[in-house]
Every structure is written in structure tokens, then in C-alpha cells.
Image (tube, helix red, strand yellow):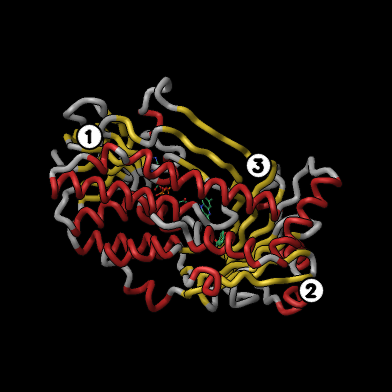
Amino acid sequence: MRTQVVIVGGGPSGLLLSQLLYTKGIDSVVLERQTRAYVLSRIRAGVLERGMVDLMTRAGVDARMRTEGIPHTGTLIAQGDTLFRVDFAKHTGQSVMLYGQTEVTRDLYAARDAAGAKILHEVDAVEIHDADRDAPFVTFQHGGSDQRIDCDFIAGCDGFHGVSRRSIPAEVRQEYEKVYPFGWLGVLSETPPVNDELIYANSSRGFALCSMRNPQLSRYYIQCSMADKPEDWTDTAFWHELRRRIPAEQADTLVTGPSVEKSIAPLRSFVTEPMQWGRLFLCGDAAHIVPPTGAKGLNTAASDVHYLFDGLCQHYLDGASEGLNHYSERALARVWKAERFSWWFSSLMHRYPDQSAFDLRIQQAELAFLRDSDAAQKALAENYVGLPY
Ligand code: RFL
Ligand code: PHB
């Protein structure tokens, strides 16, 4: 088999790239390790930046997002029982869109199906060959047989545990990592959200976040120990703890119900450099991870896809190599700003096991500064709605 671009990984990065390439007549094949049902069962990001919304529009998959997504023009930050709002619209003239990653993925699958795209599920033993030469190829197992696809380029969109990053020789790669000493316990419940905007809460018992997917589906998180297992937390225990971490007024009106999903995510900051090796380009979680505070994971994956799509269009449509040659620098310049913001927002909102009395006072002072300073709120708003591509 032969194609122009082999895309390893059929998560949001891989599907979005393949759909964008299709709009320009560039051929691709997507190789996904899991079943489609499994990919669609993962509950992950919920907030889309303007750049991601624009990419969905360019890919022609924005119709349902436009009717079912909920634009948010601000967010609430709680410090104990006090609450203040950061107004994105006032500070940036922009908003974000509440629309789940699961729905983004579902819309992309529908569009790819309609176009008769080649997406192979349940592929195994994917290996990338000759990415540093002129004629790369990918081998894998599918449906019980060994297969090979020759291509011009390979997009490594296979997430943090994928094969693509590890295909770049260790001596070429530089990795930067910070692991946080806690996780997020997330619950999805078929209950109306406690508030019509998100609430990020810093409490003496640890961080909490009130988010949503739609007017009847809420997503809540609490900071937990990495030693915890989801099954350690009954629904009753979760709701009790959440109530203790959010302001009394919201705790009193919180509607609870059975969880329809419950999981624990670790918090990690990670970047690998470079994001390109010969004809192999890494996108999204394959190249970097952010802690979820600030919802930058999926959005940073989207900006990578934008730069790679731009480079591939230049190559195939204009015969220019500039975009592909500078992919890694362009993507990393924005990645590191998202890393900085996610790290800063995480540091501001969580309780750390080794936090001294001094550290706590500094955290409180920083929150007070954010509450009282227009300039500080503008900086948060600018990062939250998404830095320009
Ligand atoms: P994904 O979504 O991990 O998709 C990668 C795909 O590649 C497949 N794959 C392979 N396929 C073929 N061969 C192999 N060897 C393969 N190895 C892996 C996988 O099955 C998968 O389908 O990466 P992508 O597309 O770059 O998208 C990135 C986003 O998914 C990610 O940044 C966010 O979801 C991060 N994230 C969150 N971000 C937010 O902004 N807000 C959140 O609330 C939020 N919650 C989360 C998250 C990530 C989590 N992970 C990774 C554990 C919660 C969790 C649990
Ligand atoms: C979510 O709705 O899952 C969500 C929202 C905002 C975040 C992280 C996760 O910062």
C-alpha cells in the first residue's frame, strides 16, 4: 500500500490532521491501536480554544459544535468561600467553547467515514522505518497479517505511550519532565452543572473543578492522592469531598447523582525536543503533556496539527519546504508557553504535600493579586482563551 501521509494514532490529533489534509486533496491512512468504541469511551478534555474551533471549521466538522457547544466568556476562581470572575471577553474580546473531546472525536469519525477515509483500527506492532531517509515506510499487523505502507511523511499522533516518539533515536531526543505529587479524580454525572461557568477552586482540602459537557451533564474533579484508586471513592464520598472544597453557596445548590464515569488522571508536565526527525513529525500528547489545569492538552495538540498541516500544504500545493523544515521550532515555541501556563495555574490552585507555611502565604497572595489586578486577570484570560498560532 502507498499513501502520502501515514498518521499513527486515531485520537483527536490524528483524525483532525487526516480530515484537514483531505480538504486539500492530500491522501492519508490512519493507524489506530484501539477499537473505535474504546477511543470514544475516553472522557477527557472539555474546553476548546478559538484556534481549535477555527480548525474544526476549516475541517468542515463544526456544525454540531456550533449548536451543542456552549461558549463561555469567563470563568470563576474560588479561594475558600470567596469567588471572583475572570472575564475573557472584556480582557481579550474572545471566548472558549465547552464541547467535549469525545464529541470532537465523534464528529471527526463521522466526517472521515463520509469521505471514505482509510482508518485501520486494532492495528498492532506499528514500526516506523527510514524516517531519516527519502522513502520512509511503516509496518504493522492488522487482521492477522503483516502489512506495509510506503509514504512521504509520517505524523506521530499516538499519544504519550505511543511508538512514534520512541522511534526518534535517544541521542537525538531531549526530554523535560515534571511529575506532580497528586492526581485528579474525575466524575461525570447526569446532573445539571452547579454553575453556568467553570469554577476552579483552591481550598485548604485541595483543588476542585466544576465543569460540564451540556446542561444535563456535569464533569467534576477533585485533587487526590496518586495512591488512590477510583474504586476507593464511593459516589457519596466524592460528592461530600467536592462540597467541602467549593464555596458554601455552590455547595448548597450542587445537584448530585450517580457517577456515569469515574477515573483518576496523573498530573505531568512533559516535553520532548525536537518534535521532528527527518520525515517523522510528532503531534499532541506524543510530544508533550500538560497538567489539565487550564485545559491546554487538546488545544496544544490542535496547534501542532495546525503547524504540520500548514507545512504539508506548503510542500504539496506550493512545492515549498519552509513550513516542514521549521515545524519543530514553530510548534515548540507555542508548546512551551502552554506548558508554562499549565504549570503556573496548577501551582496556584493545588495543595502540595511539601508546601511550607511560607509557600501557602505566597499562594494566597498570588490569588489575592489575581483577584484585585486587572493586569493579572488579563494575563490569565489571554492564556486561557489561547495564544495566537
Ligand atoms: P490521544 O488522545 O492520546 O490519542 C492517541 C491515539 O493513539 C493511539 N495509539 C496508537 N495507535 C497505533 N499504534 C500505537 N503504537 C499507538 N499507541 C497509541 C491511542 O490508542 C490513541 O487513540 O492523543 P492526541 O490525539 O494527541 O490528543 C491529545 C488529547 O487527548 C490530550 O491532550 C487531552 O485529552 C489531555 N487531557 C485533558 N486535556 C484537557 O485539555 N482537559 C482535560 O480535562 C483532560 N483530561 C487528558 C485528560 C488526558 C488523559 N490521559 C492521556 C490519560 C484525562 C486523561 C485521563
Ligand atoms: C473538563 O471539562 O474536563 C475540564 C475543563 C477545564 C479544565 C480541565 C478539564 O481545566
Residue annotated with mark 1 = 145
Placement of 88 over or under 20, stated as above or below: below
Looking at the image, tell me whether mark 2 or mark 3 is earlier in sequence order.
Answer: 3
Residue situated in front as seen by the camera: 287 or 378: 378
Type of amino acid at the residue the image marks with label 3 = Tyr
Q: Nearer the viewer, mark 1 or mark 3?
A: 3
Task: Write down which quadrant ligand 2 falls in.
Answer: bottom right
What residue is at 32 percent from the left and 52 percent from the top? Answer: 306
Residue annotated with mark 2 = 248
Q: Nearer the viewer, mark 2 or mark 1?
A: 2
Specify the quadrant that holds the N terminus: top left
- Tell me which corner region of the image, top left, top right, bottom left or bottom right, holds residue 25: bottom left
Residue situated in front as seen by the camera: 54 or 161: 54
Q: Is residue 98 visible in the rendered structure shown here?
A: no
Mark 2 CB within 8 Å of ligand 2: no
Mark 1 CB within 8 Å of ligand 1: no
Residue 145's spot in the image, x, y percent?
22, 34
Placement of 311 over or under 173, stated as above or below: below
Residue 225's spot in the image, x, y percent?
71, 46
Q: Is residue 2 visible in the rendered structure shown here?
A: yes
Q: Mark 1 packing: few (<14 Cα in 10 Å), some, or many (20+)?
A: few
User: Label 2, label 3: how many angstroms apart (C-alpha)?
Assistant: 28 Å
What residue is at 39 percent from the left and 61 percent from the top? Answer: 51
Residue annotated with mark 3 = 180
SS label for mark 3:
strand
SS label for mark 1:
strand
User: Label 1, label 3: how many angstroms apart (C-alpha)?
Assistant: 42 Å
Type of amino acid at the residue the image marks with label 1 = Ser
Residue 127's spot in the image, x, y percent?
30, 30
Residue situated in front as seen by the camera: 311 or 165: 311
